[in-house]
Image: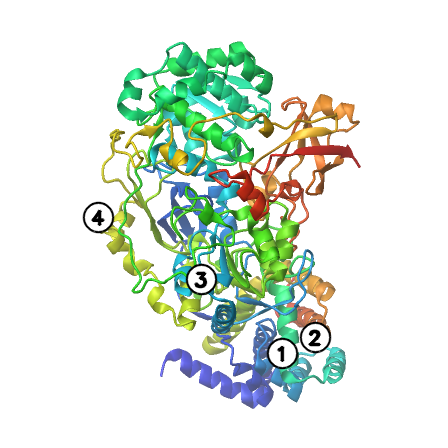
Amino acid sequence: MSRQAQLTLVTARYSFYRLLQLVFSYPTKQLVDMLQDGSFIYTLEILMKELRISETVLIELKDELNEKETDAGELLQQMEIEYTRLFINAYPKAAVGLYASLHWNKQCVFSDPVEFWRKAKVALNDRWNERSDHLVAELGFMGYLIEKELEQKNRIYYTLQNEFLERHFLKWLPAFCAKLTESAESKFYKIISRITMDFIEKEVEYLKVS
Amino acid sequence: MSRDQVSRRSFIKGAVATTGVAALAVLNSKIDLDLFHDSTAYAGGEVETKPGYCGICGMECAFTGKLVDGKLVKLEGNTEDLQSGGSLCAKGNAGINMLYDPDRLKYPLLRTNPEKGIGVDPKWKRISWDEAFAIAASKLDEARKQYGGKSIVWIGKHKGKDFLSAVGSPNDICHHSTCDTVRDVACEATFGINSFIPDVAESDYILCFGWDQFGKAKNAWARGLSENLGRNKGKLVVLDPRLSPTASKAHEWIPVRPGGDHAVILAMIHVIIKENLIDADFIAKFTSGFDKLVPAVNAYTPEWAAEISDVPAETIVRIAREFAAAPSAVIPFHKREAAQVRFNGMSLARAMLILMAITGNYEKRGGAIFARSAKLEKMKPKAKGKLETTERIDGAEKFPLLLPEPLKGEAIFQVVPDAILSEKPYPVKAAIIYAQGLFAMSDPQKYVEALKKLDFVININILPDEIATMADLVLPECTYLEKGGISGRKYNAIYTQIAVAEAMVKPMYESMPLSKILNGIMEKMGLTDFITPSGKDTYDLQLDPYNVRYKDIVKMGGVFTPKKEFKPKDLATLKTHSKKIEIYSEELAKHGYAPLPVHKDEWMIAPQNKNQFYFTTTRMATHRHASTQNMVWLHEIHPENSVVINKKAAEKLGIKDGEIVKVTSPTGEIKIKARLTAGIRPDTICVPHGYGHWAKFMSLAQGLGANDGDIMPLSTREETFKLNDPSASSFDCQFIAEVKKL
């Protein structure tokens, strides 16, 4: 692979982690605007093409957003309620929850993400007020490792990505996505769940996880 | 330009060149997605310790918190502390579960579903604190302008006085009338202080009417009792219809008939007086009214008491003699035991206090001791509010011993649903509910109906429990592990000790301490001048009387003891009419209440057939009320409750162990597993409190067990006024329950 192609691929991976951070953070007007003006899907199309992830699911997302045709304020409130129900305090089922420890594969000993941060010599910013095993933090960690890899051109960061994916992410993300698909009432989060799994499967290939 | 900025710029340039503008959309997100920075903070599993004190129950046991890489991993009792004595109970240890509970409230939540009720999804959406304060202020102002400040009620711990006096509302409603107002009022009427410390650790004779400390685990007392028994020091005698954990460790368990405790103690007083086993010297120096007691107990013979209590007359005589002869003796009582739950509770409490008085068991080690709580300097707000009226929705102003002054006393919790629904004496429109679960109220269905009637309910809470699901606005309070503090503590204050706390971790998510939440609301309402200063800036001011600083106490490990010495107080300078311990209570007489203990036959109820039982309740040692069932370690030990029923009684009904049965009362019914045992009277059942959660936001607690409160009665205002008990207690076990197979 040429250097340029490599850079493109890694950048696409980085952007994908950022995008997932955005969708798994509390919905904002910015996200709703991106959904309604088409830039969200456009971004996804480009990134999924680059990463060779099947874009079929985007047709469903387009249809879902076209069907909605709701006022931006109303769409935002719908997403806020759904997000709160799924990830903050949920009803009537127990919350899906965005914490690794809730979905951890019980056959394995829980690997605290802090161990990986220690190895990478990084720390969460003080303004982060959620738990350390929150999905947005863990996605951010992968993004940061990619950034460091590009910045320092050091193979260690690639290795750390591999380790984090194999020893941590894969132990809980599939279960999380399955639960999200089952629990989500909105098609948006069901589709996001599938997109997340498709991306992670590509990550397994790229990072050569055994 | 920083190194990070340089690398970010070149990276973005690269991104544009490769993936195009699309990537910029997510790279330039308005949400902060850059969560990490280079650091060696987690270099080697850094261990840190911080002092704190527990906030699960009111005992406030001091502990040391251990953190590894900034994560709280252990809480260990402080060995210097009178409360914890180096150990924490199961609840205290499990405080970590509360901190890291994934179900806990994290952000302000606004209800979007106008429909309310049991099992109804509030359809919350998260909002910002700014929005939350604005909405709260607006709704409370609306109620105030249209219906007056009095239309706003505070329900929960007494932490809303600043707010209430600022808006002019007298309605400060705590739950204590279902808890310990009998003790409070009986103690005030007897010696002018609302409680005492039973020095069980050093006592030669401990006589319990209920008071199951091994069952309920109030740390210092359970530990003290345990140490006493371990040293073989004192004799423990327990009167309880059930073989409670404490009864099972006692030298003697006496299965008294529920409601019969009162007769037993009246007869004990009778015996001690008749056989001249009194401490005449103590009575002469430190009590008043003994001469009136003598004729009053004349009729209460052991034979009379035996009929009522099922305790043999010779046993009553023997334990009376033992009690009087012991070098030190104590009758501990606290809350929700024999003294709180039946109509004769107030008289029973007074009799217990009087028995200790006539045998000289006050202000000595092993007896009843008055707490030496620290007298911290009180902070004051800039302005003092004016109440619109002293008339409250619970009518507590009619009970002068319960509420001696507006906003200074207790409340009549059990009448609140009736007051709201009937709009008597006036309508209530808004409520702030703080640290008070729905299950604190008997007959919670009625409470739910009352809450539905209100225009706006704000709930300040840690967990998304039943009350939270009934609220319009839910505000997440941080746990005690996320804030600092100072406490003068009273529960086991044999001498004065001050505990300080550092926040173990900063408040998680967007939770806040209560003071900050209330300040936010009051600032928006323009009521800043009424806020009492609190928080870190006031710690050293509060400690002024002791000439010590907060930082110094932290360095000492979190506990400061000005003087490690117990010195008996002068019992001839008490805040009573006679300045002494009032056997005959002038205060009770002044307000038209019985000044001496008295038995009334009309108080006695009894089962009439094999399906009917006396009802009793208790707590699990590993749980506190209905607030800890979602804590994972505690949930693992005691996930659900059962109805405890005598084996032989159950056999007569064809009930097997573990079978689901129906328990009914005039109030309602529950379906619950039966647990059969020989260790309870055949005419009595027991349903431990705290279970039956229906709030499905609590993933561990929900759906397990049954709520005892569903079959316990509420009272109306009129019923409480008619009963005219000085403590206005709920007496919520004063009924007969029925048990049937399903």
Q: Is B153 situated above or below B528?
A: above
Which one is in front, B257 or B499? B257
Q: Residues within 10 Å of mark 2 (few under 14, many from 20)?
A: some
Which numbered marker is on residue A188?
A: 2
Q: Residues within 10 Å of mark 1 (few under 14, many from 20)?
A: some
Q: Is B612 situated above or below B626?
A: above
Q: What element carries label 2?
A: helix
- Chain letter for mark 1: A
Q: Distance between the residues labelled 3 and 2?
A: 32 Å
Q: Is mark 3 on a helix, strand or loop?
A: loop
Q: Where is residue B203 in the image (x, y as percent from the top left)?
A: 38, 22
**Which residue is drawn at the image coordinates 56% and 76% (left, top)?**
A18
Q: Mark 3 points at which residue?
A: B512
Which one is in front, A16 or A38? A38
Q: Name the residue under label 1.
A: A76
Q: Position of residue B683 (x, y in %)?
A: 67, 24
Q: Earlier in the sequence, mark 3 or mark 4?
A: 3
Number of numbered callouts drawn: 4
Q: Distance between the residues labelled 3 and 1?
A: 26 Å
Say which quarter of the image contains residue A94: bottom right
Nearer the camera: disc 1 or disc 2: 1
**Which residue is drawn at the image coordinates 33% and 21% (left, top)?**
B360
Nearer the camera: disc 3 or disc 4: 4
- Chain letter for mark 4: B
What amino acid is at disc 2? Phe
What amino acid is at disc 3? Met
Q: Where is residue A103 in the image (x, y as percent from the top left)?
A: 64, 57
Q: Mark 4 points at which residue?
A: B545
Q: Residues within 10 Å of mark 4 (few under 14, many from 20)?
A: few
